[in-house]
């Protein structure tokens, strides 16, 4: 097939910002002596086009005549007048989502006034780097591998200038050429021994246990079922379509088998013993049910735990859907694509909830290893700096291009996230309470409705996720390891579907994410009572997918909707008009079966009841023994000001402005409290406030809590603190704790005891304790969980032949007896909340406002430094983990809410990472005024050391400033709670903290404190 | 009667709802129209007084900001007719109506050659908007000076603005020095980024967030009726949008809203009185 190269680059003399960025990073990250870099965009145009068409295509569509030049069929570099030594060109592997290439292909179609023939025509993008510098070929290889390309999805070519200008560069366009026959494999499970069953599960990467394989085998022996199969031309053997469908539906990801297991729990210290039948039902849903009962008529929950997102009522007009997901493993492999898919993927959750929500905000929380990691990297892991930047950029592109503001987030650092970064992405959406005269949060496909797939096409993307190893890859085989999203294809789809929704054209909608059509249609079939799917009908990105692959593909930007037959013409017409692909792929029935056909032949027949309820419950064991840490014996520091500056520079404390600025946090025009606030717009907001409906003055607060550092002591208090922090943050900006809902997102390390997880019982006990805390604390706060998610296998495990007795050369993780390295993430719970703000014009920010205002602290400070940043900065964990007194905190938060609504509060800021001292510093330098603080006035229980009072991370504490003339009102309102007047805002730009004897403990200029806080992550 | 405003949507445009809301507050009768409705002939520009290209990421900004979308608009024909959408737009301009392009919409106007349209040569590309010098997309608020001598009808009576920019490709570059001096001489430079301390146009980051030549943030055509700007006026139509409103920094009339009110007033006077 003929391929023509078109190259486009900025005119000589114009600054190449992308090249500059590469230059900076090659020097700073890799230490290479690169002198200059310029970039050239490459388009590989495949097909027999005339020279005139190619020239026009380049000139009119690809090139901006004001700033760019181009070449067709020859290198552009000589025309750039740029003195370079090397060329690195990076292009996608076959089958990888190439958004640039897709848009270029569409532009070519406009020019040709006809669609491209996908069998022999196409446009593919690549990027060329012209590099000047004295570099070895190893240096260039390193630059390509560690900076410019990801070998899982990309290929690269390195040429010297001489080679390049002599021979040019030629390689085949990344077309998927591999074809497999559309065959269906079958197995007679009844003939397989236990070992063979397990081998089958292993070989096909099904991740089904022996008991699950046996359950399937036994079901396929049932005479009534076998008879029904015969009627449809199927034998008693199971087909690959069925086996894959069952494995997907029964996966941990979809059925949450650990959260639904029967767990026998023993506390080895106290002797307590009990059995819990599903920690999800007992603790998480259990608490929500109790809260809803208690609320009675004031219950604001509309749809919880049943749909793709949880839904609450917001006001008399709107419902709000909220969901947070994780995309950890894909982000470890391809940080950019993984995170991009994470955000556009979670967008489809509220979008596929009820009749479909309009998306109004995103949240993002990342957990990384420190970006300045200087120890050796274990094999196959990417440097944390690369993960950080890739994830950041993926979320930037996903969120910004979708036009959804990213309003709230944080970044947590711990070396153990080296093995697996955590990438939490959340999305909220609003639905009018009624759509087409029905409650908007309900949906229901009916028998007879058509199954319609909308959006992108199907490829081998993400089939069996990341586990499908890359070693089988060769030229021409599609890269399946990671899916890459395309925000614009999705935006076009959501624009269309919202219109179809308001025209009442469908009865149900859900997204195609994990598990693809198998999951979406399998789920919706439950609404109708059955479904038939014709697997040859969904449009494919390239030919040659087997039926089971079509069923399971995780290709992005797809929704499945149920369209009544009488509305299908209008639905398809609207889709065509709005340039969105929509295809009828089946029909909902009431047969009780998920019926799969390929070209008319039945290739799968699964009873819905068995599919959804047949998975056997796991039985697991948990044993709790509190970890033994010592309370450190620290000398009291002389210079507390210096310690404070150190604390402000800690990665977990310092400014994240670098990241926040690159996210659009204001699009849609509802921004009230932005993530960055204060006199210079750079203070760290506790939470976001926004108005999703611009015609109203009520709105929502969005916040979260996360503190995995406490997991090393006790996950019960880790979870309690996360919940408390989330609630507290939302209250600080004006969220109503009595109209607040939560989401629990657990990211755990594998908690099932095995050879590779000898400490599984302990890790499971950690899980039980955290879940129990979710129950206990959401119940007291009255903040129901409405949805959540768990991700249970966040470990790195690699056979490296290390010496189990020797030193770990990587400095993180543990060496197992067999010499493999295991790095488990610290058990991490993200608790996200959304709360109503009845009047956003009362919202409060964290920065001090004016000299003379009085400074109060709400809540008790104790010597609770276990797990604190202060101990961590000195290399200790400690014992005294902060404990949450939720009953007291709840009263405090309600009073503060009232004070905010009465207009008594000038600023409010929570004290968490780094304690009181850090919170004081942040309040002061964000507001641009100093603070004078009398430390002896702080309500405190403990040994009295100033450093402990300053850096303890006791829960539920808030610092507020109050105008002098509101002192009496405020104090009256807070009466009976633990609070104290501890100082005031001063005009001098200094933080002055004195002890009871009037001696300065801290006397630091705000500029120094702020510099310490802003420097560490000023730029990556 | 209220002037009718068409707010374009689709293909990655994403600020259409708040822009329509602001137009409504300003006294217009806005309608969000998907590009496909124009291309299918269901809507026609002649029925509107104001055409707004809102912010967004048309076609993901692949091939360069709004580059692919400009190509689409130049080639797209109205279904069952020989008319091109571009013809409708040129007629719209000739009829003396108003066009505003915001952020991605400004990029689109520039890449369609509708701005700066030196000597009213609409369709010629003479300036472009490209990657910020920082190499980054950024969301930040900027101070702007309005050129009092500009013919731009949207900025009448305004002298200083404070608005957010949210872009990665907002650096204005000109084809040649002559283009720049033409823009200057004909007062087609409407908005410039200024240093808050001096009030003067600045090349200093972050006050000039992208490195635009002569700190240009917005330009108009020679008639003043086609206006494009990188900052988002629709993002400051309510006092709570100001990043420091909780510190008492409140504008009597949000300047973003005023820009749309000016348009409404002009259209009322010109077409509806």
Image (spheres, coloured by chain):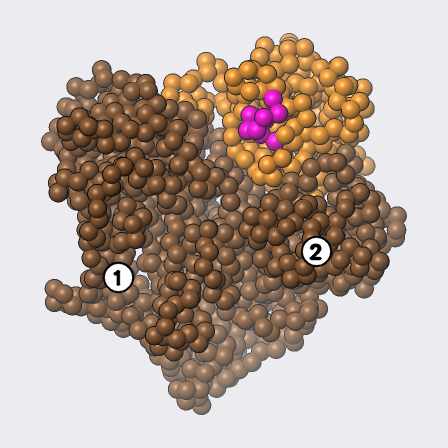
Question: Residue A531, image x and y in percent?
Answer: 49, 65
Q: Of residues A796 and A247, which is closer to you in this image?
A: A796
Marks 1 and 2 on same chain? yes
Q: Is residue A103 visible?
A: no
Residue at image position (39%, 28%) is A1007
Q: Is residue A455 magenta?
A: no
Q: Which residue is mark 1?
A: A766
**In the image, residue A890 above or below residue A162:** above
Residue at image position (39%, 62%) is A811
Judging from the image, mark 1 belongs to the subunit labelled A
- Marks 1 and 2, the one that precedes in the sequence: 2
Q: Colour of chain B?
A: orange
**In the image, residue A957 above or below residue A217:** above
Instruction: Say what secondary structure mark 2 lies in.
Output: strand
Q: Please give the label number shown on residue A623.
A: none
Q: Residues within 10 Å of mark 2 (few under 14, many from 20)?
A: many
Q: Quadrant of residue A530?
A: bottom left
Judging from the image, mark 2 belongs to the subunit labelled A
Question: Residue B199, image x and y in percent?
Answer: 56, 15
Q: Please give the label number shown on residue A88.
A: 2
> Which residues are drawn in magenta?
B202-210
Instruction: Say what secondary structure mark 1 lies in.
Output: helix
* Mark 1 or 2: the one toward you: 2
Q: Quadrant of residue A123?
A: bottom right
Main SS category, magenta section: loop
Question: Residue B206, image x and y in percent?
Answer: 55, 29
Q: Colour of chain A?
A: brown
Q: Of residues A473 and A413, which is closer to you in this image?
A: A413
Q: Quadrant of residue A984?
A: top left
Alpha carbon separation for disc pair 1 and 2: 48 Å
Question: Residue A445, image x and y in percent?
Answer: 46, 56
Q: Of residues A296 and A663, which is closer to you in this image?
A: A663
């Amino acid at each position: 097939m003929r391929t023509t190269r078109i190259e486009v680059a900025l005119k000589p003399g114009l600054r190449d910002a992308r090249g500059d960025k590469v230059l900076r990073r090659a020097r700073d990250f890799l230490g290479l002596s690169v002198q200059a870099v310029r970039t050239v965009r490459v388009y590989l145009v495949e097909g027999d086009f005339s020279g005139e068409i190619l020239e026009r295509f380049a000139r009119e569509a690809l090139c901006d005549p004001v700033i760019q030049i181009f070449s067709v069929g020859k290198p552009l570099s000589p025309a750039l007048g740029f003195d370079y030594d090397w060329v690195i060109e990076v292009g996608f592997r076959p089958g990888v989502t190439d958004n640039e290439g897709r848009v270029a292909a569409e532009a070519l179609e406009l020019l040709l006034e006809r669609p491209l023939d996908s069998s022999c025509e196409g446009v593919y993008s690549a990027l060329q780097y012209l590099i000047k510098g004295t570099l070895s070929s190893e240096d260039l290889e390193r630059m390509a591998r560690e900076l410019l390309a990801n070998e899982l999805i990309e290929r690269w070519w390195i040429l010297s200038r001489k080679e390049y200008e002599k021979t040019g560069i030629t390689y085949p366009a990344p077309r998927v050429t591999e074809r497999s026959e559309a065959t269906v494999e079958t197995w007679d499970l009844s003939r397989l021994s236990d070992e063979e069953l397990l081998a089958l599960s292993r070989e096909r990467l099904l991740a089904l246990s022996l008991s699950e394989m046996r359950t399937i085998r036994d079901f396929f022996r049932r005479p009534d079922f076998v008879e029904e199969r015969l009627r449809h031309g199927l034998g008693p053997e199971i087909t690959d379509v069925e086996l894959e469908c069952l494995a997907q539906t029964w996966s941990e990801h979809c059925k949450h088998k650990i959260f639904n297991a029967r767990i026998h729990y023993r506390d080895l210290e106290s002797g307590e013993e009990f059995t819990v039948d599903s920690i999800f039902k007992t603790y998480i849903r259990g608490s929500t049910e109790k809260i809803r009962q208690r609320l009675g008529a004031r219950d604001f929950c509309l749809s919880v735990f049943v749909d793709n997102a949880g839904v609450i009522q917001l006001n008399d007009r709107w419902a709000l859907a909220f969901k947070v997901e994780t995309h950890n493993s894909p982000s470890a492999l391809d940080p950019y694509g993984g995170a991009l898919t994470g955000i556009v993927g979670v967008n489809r959750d509220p979008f596929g909830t009820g009749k479909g929500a309009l998306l109004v905000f995103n949240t993002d929380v990342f957990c990384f290893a420190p970006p300045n990691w200087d120890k050796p990297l274990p094999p196959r892991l990417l440097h944390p700096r690369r993960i950080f930047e890739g994830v950041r950029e993926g979320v930037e592109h996903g969120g910004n291009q979708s036009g959804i503001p990213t309003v709230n987030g944080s970044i947590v650092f711990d070396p153990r996230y080296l093995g697996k970064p955590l990438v939490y992405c959340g999305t909220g959406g609003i639905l009018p309470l009624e759509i087409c005269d029905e409650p908007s949060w309900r949906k229901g496909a009916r028998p007879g409705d058509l199954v319609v797939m909308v959006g992108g096409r199907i490829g081998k993307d993400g089939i069996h996720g990341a586990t499908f190893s890359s070693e089988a890859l060769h030229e021409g085989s599609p890269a399946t390891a990671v899916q890459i999203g395309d925000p614009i294809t999705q935006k076009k789809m959501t624009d269309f579907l919202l219109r179809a929704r308001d025209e009442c054209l469908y009865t149900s909608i859900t997204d195609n994410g994990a598990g693809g059509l198998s999951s979406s249609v399998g789920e919706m079939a439950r609404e109708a009572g059955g479904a038939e799917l014709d697997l040859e009908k969904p449009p494919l990105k390239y030919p040659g997918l087997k039926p089971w692959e079509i069923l399971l593909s995780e290709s992005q930007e797809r929704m499945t909707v149920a369209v009544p037959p009488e509305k299908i013409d209008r639905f398809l017409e609207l889709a065509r008009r709005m340039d969105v692909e929509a295809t009828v792929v089946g029909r909902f029935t009431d047969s009780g079966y998920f019926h799969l056909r390929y070209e008319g032949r039945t290739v799968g027949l699964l009873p819905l009841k068995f599919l959804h309820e047949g998975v056997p419950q796991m039985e697991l064991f948990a044993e709790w023994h509190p970890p033994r840490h010592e309370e450190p014996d620290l000398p009291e520091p002389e210079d507390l000001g210096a310690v404070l500056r150190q604390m402000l520079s800690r990665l977990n404390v310092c400014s994240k402005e670098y990241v926040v600025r690159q996210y659009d946090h204001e699009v849609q025009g509802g921004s009230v409290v932005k993530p960055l606030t204060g006199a210079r717009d750079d203070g760290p907001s506790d939470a976001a406030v926004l108005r999703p409906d611009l015609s109203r003055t009520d709105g929502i607060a969005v916040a979260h809590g996360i503190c995995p550092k406490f997991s090393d002591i006790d996950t019960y208090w880790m979870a309690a603190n996360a919940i408390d922090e989330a609630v507290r943050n939302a209250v600080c900006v004006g969220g109503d704790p009595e109209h607040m809902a939560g989401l629990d997102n657990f990211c755990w390390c594998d908690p099932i005891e095995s050879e590779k997880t000898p400490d599984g019982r302990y890790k499971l006990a950690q899980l039980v304790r955290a879940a129990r805390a979710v129950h206990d604390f959401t119940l007291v706060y009255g903040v129901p969980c409405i949805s959540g998610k768990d991700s249970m296998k966040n470990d790195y495990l690699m056979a490296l032949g290390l010496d189990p007795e020797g030193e770990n050369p990587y400095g993180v993780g543990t060496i197992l007896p067999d010499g493999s390295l295991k790095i488990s993430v610290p058990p991490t719970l993200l608790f996200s909340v959304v709360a109503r703000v009845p009047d956003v014009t009362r919202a409060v920010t964290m920065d001090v406002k004016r000299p003379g205002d009085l400074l109060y602290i709400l809540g008790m400070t104790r010597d609770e430094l276990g797990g604190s940043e202060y101990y961590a900065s000195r290399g200790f964990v400690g014992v005294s983990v902060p404990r949450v007194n939720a009953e007291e905190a709840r009263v405090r938060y309600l009073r503060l809410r009232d004070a905010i609504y009465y207009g008594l509060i000038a600023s409010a800021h929570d004290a968490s990472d780094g304690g009181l001292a850090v919170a004081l510093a942040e309040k002061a330098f964000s507001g641009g005024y100093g603070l004078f603080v009398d430390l002896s006035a702080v309500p405190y229980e403990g040994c009295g050391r100033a450093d402990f009072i300053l850096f303890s991370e006791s829960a539920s504490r808030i610092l507020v400033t109050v105008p002098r003339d509101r002192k009496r009102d405020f104090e009256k309102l807070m009466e009976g709670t633990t609070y104290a007047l501890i100082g005031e805002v001063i005009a001098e730009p200094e933080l002055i903290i004195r002890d009871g004897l009037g001696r300065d403990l801290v006397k630091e200029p705000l500029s120094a404190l702020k510099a310490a806080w802003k420097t560490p992550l000023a730029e990556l | 009667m209220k002037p009718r405003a068409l707010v374009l949507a689709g293909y990655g445009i994403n600020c259409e709802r708040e822009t329509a809301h602001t137009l409504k507050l300003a006294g217009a009768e806005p309608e969000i129209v998907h590009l496909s409705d124009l291309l299918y002939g269901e809507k026609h520009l002649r029925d509107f007084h104001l055409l707004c290209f809102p912010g967004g990421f048309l076609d993901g900004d692949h091939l360069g900001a709004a580059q692919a979308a400009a190509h689409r608009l130049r080639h797209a024909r109205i279904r069952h007719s020989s008319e091109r959408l571009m013809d409708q737009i040129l007629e719209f301009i000739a009829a003396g109506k108003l066009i505003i392009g915001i952020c991605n919409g400004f990029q689109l106007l520039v890449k369609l050659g509708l701005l700066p349209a030196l000597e009213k040569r609409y369709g010629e590309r003479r300036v472009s908007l490209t990657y910020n010098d920082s190499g980054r997309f950024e969301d930040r608020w900027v101070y702007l000076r309005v050129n009092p001598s500009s013919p731009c009808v949207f900025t009448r009576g305004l002298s200083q603005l404070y608005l957010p920019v949210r872009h990665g490709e907002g650096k204005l570059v000109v084809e040649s020095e002559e283009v720049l001096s033409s823009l200057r001489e004909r007062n087609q430079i409407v908005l410039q980024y200024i240093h808050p301390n001096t009030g003067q146009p600045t090349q200093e980051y972050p006050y000039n967030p992208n490195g635009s030549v002569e700190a240009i943030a917005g330009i108009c055509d020679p008639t003043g009726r086609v206006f494009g700007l990188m900052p988002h006026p629709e993002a400051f139509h309510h006092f709570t949008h100001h990043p420091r409103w909780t510190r008492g920094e409140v504008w009597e009339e949000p300047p973003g809203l005023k820009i749309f009110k000016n348009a409404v007033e002009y259209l009322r006077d010109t077409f509806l009185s």
